[in-house]
Image (spheres, rainbow, N blue to C red):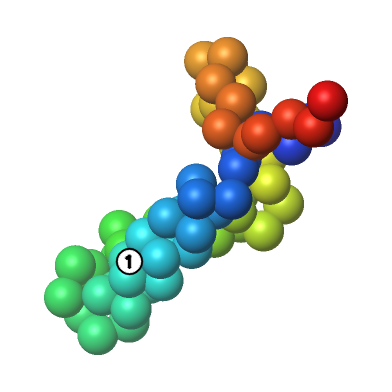
Amino acid sequence: MKTNVGGLDRIARVVAGLVLIGLAATGTVGVWGWLGIVPLATAAIGWCPAYTLLGINSCSTKP
């Protein structure tokens, strides 16, 4: 697994994941909010399977 999730992308995923989980925990969006675990996991490991399938890479490379 090569890293394909960059810094800003990771921050956005963490924020989105925490918001979704928070909304699910308060009962605002129901059980679908627990899908916020997915962006948190992809931010933690730095790899997104959807990015691999689509050929996207938001991680900067060093020369």
In the image, residue 21 lies at what x, y percent? 38, 72
- Is 13 placed left or right of 51 in the picture? left
Please provide percent x and percent y for residue 32.
Answer: 30, 58
Q: Is residue 14 visible?
A: yes
Mark 1: amino acid: Leu
Kindly identify which residue carries mark 1: 20
The structure residue drawn at horizontal position 79% and vertical position 32%, both measured from the top left corner, is 62
Nearer the observer, 17 or 63: 63
Label 1 crowd bin: few (<14), some (14–19), many (20+), radius 10 Å = many
Horizontal and vertical percent position of residue 57: 60, 26
Q: Tell me which corner region of the image, top left, top right, bottom left or bottom right, holds residue 49.
A: top right
Extreme residue in the front direction: 63
Q: Split into 4 quadrants, where in the image is the N terminus?
A: top right
- Residue 2 versus residue 41 in the image, above or below: above
- Identify the element where label 1 is drawn: helix
Give the side of residue 55 with respect to residue 39, left or right.
right
Residue at 19 percent of width and 67 percent of height: 29
Q: How many marks?
A: 1
Task: Name the residue at the left extreme.
Answer: 28
Q: Can residue 34 be seen in this view?
A: no
- For the point 32% across and 66% down, the residue is 20
Q: Where is residue 6 in the image (x, y as percent from the top left)?
A: 60, 43
Question: Could you tell whether 17 is left or right of 33 in the image?
Answer: right
Image-quadrant location for residue 51: top right
**Which residue corresponds to the image point at 68% horizontal and 40% vertical from the top-left?**
47
Residue nearest the viewer, comparing 58 with 51: 58
Work out whether residue 26 or residue 53 is closer to the camera in this orientation and state it: 53
- The quarter in which the C terminus is drawn is top right
13 left or right of 59 in image: left
Eyeballing the image, is 45 above or below 37? above
Is residue 6 placed above or below 21 in the rendered structure? above
